């Protein structure tokens, strides 16, 4: 009997979507169509591919209000924030299309001894994109659009929590005129994902998700000589130096910690504050955080929605409770957020002080509306603590001195280094992680490198 799944809304417990999972026969047909489509799609002129993909990008989110409502019901994000993901999808998609000529351009070498020499980037083949629920549009577009533009067919598997995003993407592909087989959607369990990765017709895997999921993807891919881009977890730190604008820093770090209920791989999960400004920072941070409105995310006044699932909320609360038992102190009063009385997955935000790195709240990914705040004596201590982590996706410094920011940034082990900014992605910059935050490079012109392979041309003008 075929397996099935249901998407349960964290908003009210209703069933948002239900469907059978795709089995072996559907996987076979899908990969067969993708493999066949590769032969013709790669031959289409780059300019024409870009035009078709651009139509797809625009059509996918043309009904922005419906997209926002669906996001709210699937994963609990406040309706007021839905436009941000729509705008991000458009910005990243358009940017990668605009960068295609540069990212896929031939590398021309000087003619030498009667030889013409150049390196051309060619598509890999079928690209399998496995996307998560927390930013379902933004995480998928990072690989999906450049893969298509580079000449690769794409098979997309989305989280069971956000299947309506996958459906919209599949529908838009047809409406935009993408040839049959160039972009297809599968609904799979873990075994189905492994079966797809193990198929000889799949040439590359782009995965965004947990460290555990990354290990599973890498293990499946290791049985074949194919690449895998892995964007995994984070425990992203911020350092507020003594010369920072405290009010501005605190307000931005509240947003970086609690936006999307803290469910962001590059959200702020630990904050280090110079002792000279520690108390003023805590005062402003608490005041701004107390203005958050926890509630039904369908309401326009809500700024903090529920965590995606009860089990996720229980794990987050477990980290907070363990830290409190070990001596941490709460900065925020949960009583100021009466909607938390509805029960999990509705959670009051929390910031903990008197924390240290023996506590999971400062060492393991929390992925929820909770953050730890520590005082530090100087830059040296801040750098040491920021680097004391198995993760390295983004990190930020809050200072008025750009030269200081550059020097400290050279020492911090991270894929992206921010000054006076956090929890943001610029699609013209490379998006990378170090350590357990993953491997590979998406976005920017460099993002095309992992979705294509170099082929060298060494042409003698006259027979030897």
Image: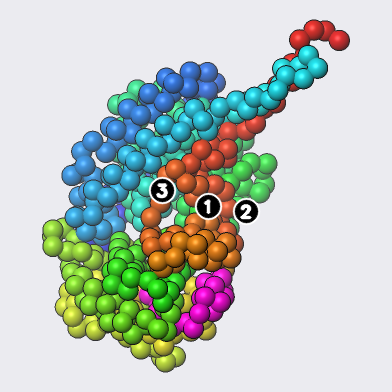
Residue 387 highlighted magenta (yes or no) = yes
Horizontal relation, residue 299 to residue 99: left or right: left
Residue 82 highlighted magenta (yes or no) = no
Q: Secondary structure at mark 2?
A: helix
- Count of numbered marks: 3
* The quadrant where residue 428 appears: top left
Q: Secondary structure at mark 1?
A: strand
The residue sitting at 23% across, 73% down in the picture is 288
Q: Badge 1: how crowded within 10 Å, few (<14), some, or many (20+)?
A: many
Q: Look at mark 2 in the image and give the residue it sits on.
A: 219
Residue 421, given in percent of the width and then of the height, sits at 38, 60
The mark nearer the N terminus, 2 or 3, is: 2
Q: Is there a contact, CB below 8 Å, between mark 2 and mark 3?
A: no
Q: Which of these two is toward me, 463 or 21?
A: 463
For residue 133, above or below residue 59: below
Q: Secondary structure at mark 3?
A: loop
Residue 43, given in percent of the width and then of the height, sits at 52, 18
Q: Badge 2: how crowded within 10 Å, few (<14), some, or many (20+)?
A: few
- Foreground mark, 3 or 1? 3
**Alpha-carbon distance for marks 3 and 1?**
12 Å
Q: Look at mark 3 in the image and give the residue it sits on.
A: 426
Q: Is residue 83 visible?
A: yes
Q: Quadrant of the image for the C terminus?
A: top right
- Foreground mark, 2 or 1? 1
The residue sitting at 19% across, 72% down in the picture is 291
Residues shaded magenta: 371-389
The mark nearer the N terminus, 2 or 1, is: 2
Q: Look at mark 1 in the image and give the residue it sits on.
A: 432
- Foreground mark, 2 or 3? 3
């Amino acid at each position: 009997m075929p397996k099935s799944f249901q998407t349960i809304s964290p908003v009210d417990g209703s069933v948002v979507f239900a469907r059978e999972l795709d089995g072996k026969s559907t996987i076979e047909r899908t990969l067969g169509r993708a493999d066949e489509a590769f032969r013709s799609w790669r031959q289409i002129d780059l300019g024409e591919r870009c035009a078709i993909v651009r139509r797809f990008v625009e059509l996918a989110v043309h009904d922005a209000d419906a997209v926002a409502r669906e996001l709210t019901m699937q994963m609990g994000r406040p309706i007021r924030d839905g436009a941000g993901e729509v705008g991000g999808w458009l910005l990243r998609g358009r940017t990668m299309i605009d960068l295609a000529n540069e990212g896929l351009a031939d590398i021309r070498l000087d003619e030498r001894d009667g030889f013409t020499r150049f390196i051309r980037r060619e598509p890999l083949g079928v690209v399998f994109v496995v996307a998560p629920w927390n930013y379902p549009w933004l995480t998928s577009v990072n690989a999906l659009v450049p893969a298509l533009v580079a000449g690769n067919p794409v098979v997309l598997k989305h989280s069971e929590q956000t299947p309506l995003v996958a459906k919209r993407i599949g529908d838009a592909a047809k409406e935009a005129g993408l040839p049959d087989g160039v972009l297809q959607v599968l609904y799979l369990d873990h075994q189905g994902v492994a079966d797809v990765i193990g198929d000889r017709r799949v040439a590359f895997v782009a995965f965004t998700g947990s460290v555990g999921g990354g290990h599973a993807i890498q293990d499946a891919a290791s049985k074949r000589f194919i690449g895998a881009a892995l964007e995994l977890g984070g425990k992203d730190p911020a350092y507020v130096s003594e010369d920072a604008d405290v009010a501005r820093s605190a307000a931005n770090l509240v947003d970086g910690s609690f936006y999307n209920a803290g469910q962001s791989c590059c959200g702020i999960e630990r904050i280090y504050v110079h002792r000279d400004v520690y108390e003023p920072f805590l005062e402003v941070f608490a005041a701004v955080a107390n203005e958050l409105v926890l509630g039904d995310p369908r309401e326009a006044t809500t700024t903090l929605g529920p965590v995606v699932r009860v089990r996720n909320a229980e794990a987050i609360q477990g980290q907070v409770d363990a830290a409190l038992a070990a001596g941490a102190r709460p900065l925020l009063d949960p009583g100021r957020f009466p909607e938390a009385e509805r029960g999990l997955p509705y959670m009051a935000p929390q910031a903990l002080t008197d924390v240290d790195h023996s506590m999971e709240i400062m060492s393991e990914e929390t992925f929820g509306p909770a953050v730890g705040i520590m005082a530090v004596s100087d830059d040296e201590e801040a750098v040491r603590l920021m680097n004391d982590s198995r993760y390295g996706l983004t990190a930020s410094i809050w200072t008025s001195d750009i030269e200081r920011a550059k020097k400290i940034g050279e020492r911090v082990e991270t894929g992206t280094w921010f000054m006076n900014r956090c929890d943001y992605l610029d699609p013209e910059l490379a998006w990378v992680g170090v350590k357990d935050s993953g491997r590979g490079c998406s976005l920017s012109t460099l993002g095309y490198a992992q979705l294509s392979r170099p082929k060298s041309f060494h042409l003698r003008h006259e027979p030897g």
